[in-house]
Structures are given as structure tokens and as C-alpha cells.
Image (cartoon, helix red, strand yellow):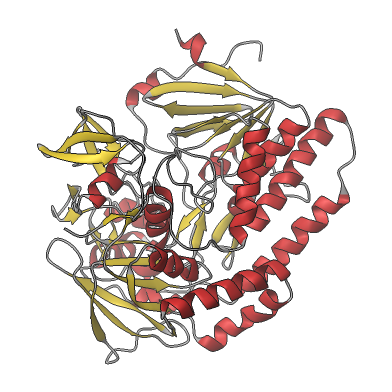
């Protein structure tokens, strides 16, 4: 696992969601992309042409490389806030 | 049904960064009704990113410029500036902003528009730049300062321009070891920024703060170096770095390998001007300011009546410029509504801040030779997986224009709509590294939104 949180007291409530079927514990206010990065996940989808791993690139809603699927809808992982019970799958083409 | 999703304000502002917020605070103070639309979850934009409430704070001190950010955010709270967060504006017309928020389609009707849409990192493709763990420099700033997430253990920071230093400082504060910080410009070229830094008190303080912060971190900025490639199995594990000449051309043979688990690359910024383009605002090309910018008059007015632009959208300049321009745009709108004169000091301030910013950015104008980092199989378009060789073939077959290259190989036709590849695609495909790139065509939707958002788009009321 690489990636973690800043040291110090985090007073936000825990939020649990699943990514590719596995449970991930996040903090309220996390984006999907950042919750996954903190959990050590780097690959959020496979690229459209050659099927290569892709992950967070711009982290500000511009590049659309961190696309994931939430309840059947393709969204940007970096601009979508995690919710308790969310089911997140790796993204493909929008 | 759609009637409930139409909002009204005298002034609609896109972007809650320093420019948009400064304009909003001033307008609210003058008694005008304002609504700010912002894609982020909290006010402040990219430069004044805030952690979510309750998150553990970033240890250590802040750079002096962030004081201005705290002041601005406090003023926005004090004046109860209304901001709609998580709002993606996808279409625009004079006095109309269509946006998607939490999966719903909304329309904001207003008399005046302020575009404070900011900028994003300039990307230079190099082998391995699509590997997970390789991000923009801005992405790492957002990660740490916006979410309290530690990017990794060993980081490489590469690129060019004044934003490399804050990236290094932030990573160090977060406890990340910065194994190398590489500035592609030569020390001598960068020295041209020195007069601009020394003659502006705020910039002098800021530069000193970063110099001390790098010293404390034990990181030495290497001038005339950059990343040649990133490697790894499914994620970045190694980086190949090397020297570049004064034009940015890689010096083969100077390579060294570093073990890293995260790489942040930022070769300056590119202004976000798509909404201005959709409105038909006149643009101009200014390489040091990041490329194509919205043209504004001495009151931040664009070529379209009732549409103002502030901050990076009119050319990269930083937060001080954006705040000064935001206040000037607000004063111009108040003057238009009330037939009052504009305080001349506001214009003087904008001119002074722009002068200082331009002088600094000229020393870090994009280096054309960096486009020679990409090899035949390096992807030039991340969305459509287009390798350099295919983009070259498209240019050879269809022509050198951005449009011809796009049509020929689909580069720039994916969901990012050419934002990431647009600044480098033509230089890469034509091999003419110093070409002035064509203005990318902006299309509706300005950003991809759900088809239901477009189908359900509220109609403007007939009377407004």
C-alpha cells in the first residue's frame, strides 16, 4: 500500500463504499478518486484503445482519466464525493 | 417541471477561485444579487484549496500569499456570497448559464456574466506519462491541500515555472520525500524573472519563503533537467531523468534512473477559455500567459457585451492578478448598473499586478524542445489512445491544422475535448515545435454531462 493520510486528528465520520466489489473505508468529504488513492488503489480504469491502466491525472475535473462507474452512471472520480454504501466499479469509455 | 430549476441573479459568476470570489464579494457588498457556480466542493478554487471540515490539518506554515486567501474566504462568508458547488457549466449564452449539479439540469438567468474559469496544468507528453501514479503537479496540490491525502513516499517533481516550488513545499509538508525537483528552464533563463520578483514586495516575500522552505526540505532545484520517461508495472516505479538544452531539447546520454512512487509534472498552466469561446468572445495568443486567452478591455469586459473575464481566463497571472481583476470587473458592473465612475486605483492595481506576473512568466515561457521527449509509441491523446506515430501520419495525410490532425487520428475527440493534448498536439504531430497552435474549437456541451441534462435543459423564461 502506498499513499495514506496526513497525521493528526481526522474528525470526519467514516464512510464505507465498494470498489470493484471490495469494501473501502473513506472519510466524509473525500472524492472517490482520493478515497481510492488513500486506500492504495492507483488503477481506476483501463484505457479505451489498448486497455492500459489509468488513474488520477489532473485531479481537478479536466482530463476525464479517472472515470469510474457509480450505480451504472459514468462519473469523474475526482469530482464525485463518496457516499456511504456507494458501489463503484472501474470505468471504461463514457 | 423545469420551471423550478431556473434561477435568477443580476450577476452570474463561473468559478469560486480568487477572481470569481473577489468579484462576488464586491458585488454583494454593493447590494447586487450574485450567484457563483463552481465545480469544486468548497470555495477557493485550485490555489486556495481548503481541506474538508474536520480533516486533519497540514502541518507546518503556509506561504504568505495564502493569507490573502484566508481574507477572501472570510469576506465571502461574512457577506454570505452564494456559491453552488459541484456545478458543471455545460452551455452558455449572454445572460444564461446552463449547468449540471448532482445529476440535475439547471439554468441561471442573469444580466451580467463573469468568467473566472481559471487554468489547468500544461501537459507535455513523455514515455510513460499515462502510468497511474504519474499526475500533474496541480493534482498533487489538490491531493494534499484539498483532501489531506499523502501522495506517496518518494516523489519526483518536474516541469517549469513558478508553481514547481509550491508543489515541492506541499509534498515536504505532507511528509513525502522529494527525491528530485527538476526545472526544465536553465538558471540563466530563469534569472530574467528576478527583477519582477525583487521589485514586487509580495512576490519577494513569497520567493524567500519558498527558498527557505526548500532549504529546510533539503531539496535542491535542478535547472535544465526534466523527466525523460516513467516506468513501472501498472503504476510508476521508476523515472528516467536527464538534461535538456536551452531550448528544452533532451540531451541523450545524460539519463539517470530514480526509484519513485509518484511523479508530479507541471509545465506551466493553460487558461480555461471554452465558455468564452462558446459566447463568441474574442481571443488572443500569448505564449508566456499560457496560450490562447480571452481578450479584455481596461474594465475586464470581453468583446461580448455584458460578459466579463478575470484571472487566468485572460492569461495566466496568479491569485493576486485574479483578485485585482475580480474587483475591477465588479466595479465595472456596478458602474454599468448605477452609472457611477470606476475607482481608478482598481485599474492601476490590475496593471501593476499584470506587469509583475508577465515579467515573471516570460522567463518560463514554454520550451519548444520538450516536445521531443515523446517517442513514436508515446500516447499524445490520453482519451483516444493515439500514439505519436499515428498523429504524425494524420498530419502528413490530412494537413497541419489542429482540425485536420483531429479528424485524421481522433486525437482531441475524447471526453477531455482536447484540453489535455490541445496545447502540444500540433507541435508533436507536425514536428514543428515552435508552431503557434490553432485555437481549439469549443463545442456544446462545454464539458461532458449526462444526456438527460441536455434533454431536460430548462428553457429561459420568455420575459427575461
Q: Is residue B23 above or below residue B449?
A: below
The quadrant holding residue B444 is top left
Left or right of B416? Residue B340 is: right
Identify the residue at image location x=34%, y=55%.
Answer: A6
Query: Is residue B451 visible in the rendered structure shown here?
Result: yes
The quadrant holding residue B369 is bottom left
Identify the residue at image location x=61%, y=43%.
Answer: B73
Left or right of A18? Residue B383 is: right
Which residue is nearer to you in this view: B323 or A18?
A18
Q: Residue furthest top?
A: B1
Which residue is nearer to you in this view: B294 or B399?
B294
> Where does the image place residue B374, in percent across and percent down from the top left?
29, 72
Identify the residue at image location x=43%, y=64%.
Answer: B170
Which residue is nearer to you in this view: B183 or B91?
B183
Q: Is residue B460 above or below residue B342?
A: above
Q: Is residue B217 above or below residue B187?
A: above
Query: Is residue B314 visible in the rendered structure shown here?
Result: no
Amino acid at each position: 500500500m502506498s499513499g495514506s493520510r496526513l497525521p493528526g486528528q481526522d474528525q470526519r465520520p467514516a464512510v464505507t463504499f465498494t470498489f470493484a466489489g471490495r469494501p473501502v473505508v473513506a472519510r466524509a468529504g473525500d472524492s472517490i478518486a482520493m478515497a481510492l488513492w488513500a486506500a492504495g488503489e492507483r488503477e481506476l480504469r483501463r484505457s479505451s484503445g489498448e486497455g492500459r491502466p489509468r488513474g488520477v491525472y489532473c485531479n481537478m475535473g479536466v482530463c476525464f482519466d479517472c472515470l469510474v462507474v457509480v450505480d451504472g452512471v459514468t462519473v469523474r472520480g475526482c469530482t464525485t464525493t463518496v457516499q456511504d454504501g456507494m458501489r463503484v466499479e472501474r470505468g471504461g469509455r463514457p | 417541471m423545469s420551471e423550478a430549476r431556473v434561477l435568477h441573479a443580476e450577476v452570474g459568476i463561473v468559478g469560486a477561485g480568487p477572481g470569481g470570489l473577489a468579484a462576488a464579494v464586491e458585488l454583494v457588498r454593493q447590494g447586487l444579487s450574485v450567484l457563483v457556480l463552481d465545480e469544486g466542493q468548497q470555495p477557493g478554487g485550485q490555489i486556495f484549496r481548503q481541506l474538508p471540515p474536520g480533516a486533519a490539518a497540514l502541518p507546518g506554515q503556509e506561504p504568505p500569499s495564502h493569507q490573502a486567501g484566508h481574507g477572501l474566504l472570510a469576506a465571502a462568508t461574512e457577506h454570505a456570497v452564494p456559491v453552488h458547488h459541484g456545478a458543471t457549466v455545460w452551455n452558455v449564452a449572454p445572460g444564461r448559464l446552463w449547468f449540471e449539479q448532482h445529476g440535475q439540469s439547471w439554468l441561471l438567468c442573469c444580466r451580467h456574466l463573469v468568467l473566472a474559469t481559471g487554468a489547468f496544468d500544461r501537459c507535455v507528453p513523455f514515455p510513460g506519462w499515462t502510468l497511474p501514479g504519474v499526475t500533474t503537479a496541480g493534482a498533487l496540490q489538490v491531493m494534499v491541500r484539498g483532501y489531506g491525502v499523502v501522495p506517496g513516499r518518494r516523489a519526483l517533481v518536474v516541469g517549469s515555472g513558478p508553481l514547481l516550488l509550491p508543489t515541492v513545499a506541499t509534498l515536504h509538508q505532507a511528509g513525502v520525500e522529494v527525491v528530485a525537483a527538476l526545472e526544465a528552464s536553465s538558471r540563466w533563463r530563469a534569472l530574467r524573472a528576478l527583477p519582477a520578483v525583487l521589485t514586487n514586495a509580495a512576490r519577494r516575500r513569497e520567493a524567500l519563503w519558498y527558498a527557505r522552505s526548500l532549504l529546510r526540505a533539503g531539496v535542491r532545484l535542478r535547472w535544465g533537467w526534466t523527466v525523460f520517461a516513467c516506468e513501472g508495472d501498472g503504476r510508476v516505479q521508476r523515472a528516467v531523468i536527464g538534461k535538456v538544452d536551452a531550448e528544452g531539447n533532451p540531451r541523450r546520454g545524460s539519463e539517470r534512473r530514480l526509484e519513485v512512487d509518484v511523479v508530479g509534472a507541471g509545465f506551466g498552466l493553460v487558461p480555461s477559455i471554452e465558455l468564452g469561446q462558446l459566447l463568441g468572445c474574442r481571443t488572443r495568443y500569448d505564449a508566456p500567459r499560457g496560450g490562447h486567452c480571452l481578450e479584455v478591455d481596461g474594465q475586464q469586459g470581453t468583446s461580448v457585451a455584458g460578459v466579463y473575464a478575470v484571472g487566468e481566463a485572460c492569461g495566466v497571472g496568479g491569485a493576486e492578478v485574479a483578485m485585482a481583476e475580480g474587483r475591477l470587473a465588479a466595479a465595472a458592473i456596478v458602474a454599468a448598473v448605477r452609472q457611477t465612475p470606476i475607482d481608478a486605483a482598481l485599474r492601476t492595481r490590475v496593471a501593476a499586478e499584470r506587469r509583475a506576473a508577465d515579467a515573471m512568466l516570460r522567463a518560463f515561457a514554454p520550451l519548444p524542445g520538450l516536445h521531443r521527449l515523446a517517442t513514436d509509441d508515446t500516447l499524445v491523446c490520453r482519451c483516444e489512445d493515439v500514439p505519436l506515430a499515428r498523429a504524425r501520419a494524420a498530419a502528413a495525410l490530412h494537413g497541419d491544422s489542429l482540425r485536420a490532425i483531429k479528424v485524421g487520428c481522433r486525437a482531441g475527440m475524447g471526453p477531455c475535448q482536447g484540453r489535455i493534448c490541445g496545447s502540444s498536439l500540433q507541435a508533436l504531430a507536425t514536428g514543428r515545435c515552435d508552431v503557434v497552435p490553432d485555437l481549439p474549437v469549443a463545442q456544446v456541451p462545454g464539458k461532458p454531462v449526462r444526456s438527460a441534462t441536455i434533454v431536460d435543459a430548462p428553457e429561459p423564461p420568455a420575459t427575461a
